[in-house]
Image (cartoon, helix red, strand yellow):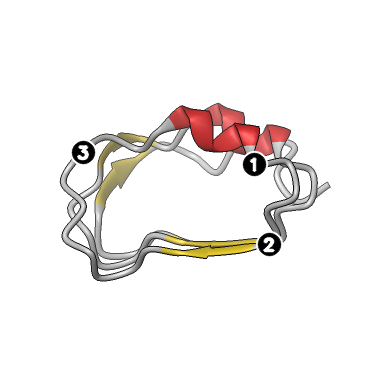
């Protein structure tokens, strides 16, 4: 599954509940106004192999275990 919400003017924190999307392969949230820390829960999405979150106000490290 792919979720692309790029350039949607999303103005919020990164929703950690995205980790519930267990079949997510690709996530694109680029070019929004998402702020806060990159959630460690992203590492729980074992199928996730591509993520794009450039041009937001996120900080922190890519979660360990991401892309295992």
Q: Residues within 10 Å of mark 3 (few under 14, many from 20)?
A: few
Residue 51 visible in the displayed image? no
Q: Is residue 67 above or below residue 36?
A: below
The residue most toward the right is 68
Q: Which mark is residue 48?
A: none
Quarter assignment of residue 49: bottom right
- In the image, 3 versus 55, the foreground residue is 3
Real-space Cα distance between discs 3 and 1? Answer: 19 Å
**N-term-proximal mark, 2 vs 1:** 2
Q: Residues within 10 Å of mark 2 (few under 14, many from 20)?
A: few
The N terminus appears in which quarter of the rendering? Answer: bottom right
**Residue contact at pointers 2 and 1, CB within 8 angstroms:** yes
Q: Is residue 33 above or below residue 39?
A: below
**N-term-proximal mark, 3 vs 1:** 3
- In the image, 30 versus 61, the foreground residue is 30
Q: Is residue 35 left or right of residue 64?
A: left
Q: Which mark is residue 21?
A: 1
- Looking at the rendered structure, the secondary structure element under dot 3 is loop
Residue depth check, mark 3 versus mark 1: number of the one nearer the observer: 1
- Looking at the rendered structure, the secondary structure element under dot 1 is loop
At x 59%, y 29%, the residue is 41
At x 16%, y 60%, the residue is 9
Q: Which residue is mark 3?
A: 12
At x 25%, y 64%, the residue is 55
Q: x, y percentage for residue 28?
A: 46, 64
Real-space Cα distance between discs 3 and 2? Answer: 23 Å
- Looking at the rendered structure, the secondary structure element under dot 2 is loop
**Residue contact at pointers 3 and 1, CB within 8 angstroms:** no
Q: x, y percentage for residue 61?
A: 49, 39
């Amino acid at each position: 599954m792919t979720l692309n919400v790029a350039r949607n003017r999303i103005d919020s924190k990164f929703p950690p509940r995205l980790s519930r999307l267990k079949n997510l392969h690709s996530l694109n949230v680029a070019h929004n106004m998402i702020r806060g820390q990159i959630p460690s829960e992203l590492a729980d999405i074992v199928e996730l192999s591509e993520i794009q979150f450039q041009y937001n106000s996120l900080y922190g490290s890519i979660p360990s275990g991401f892309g295992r």
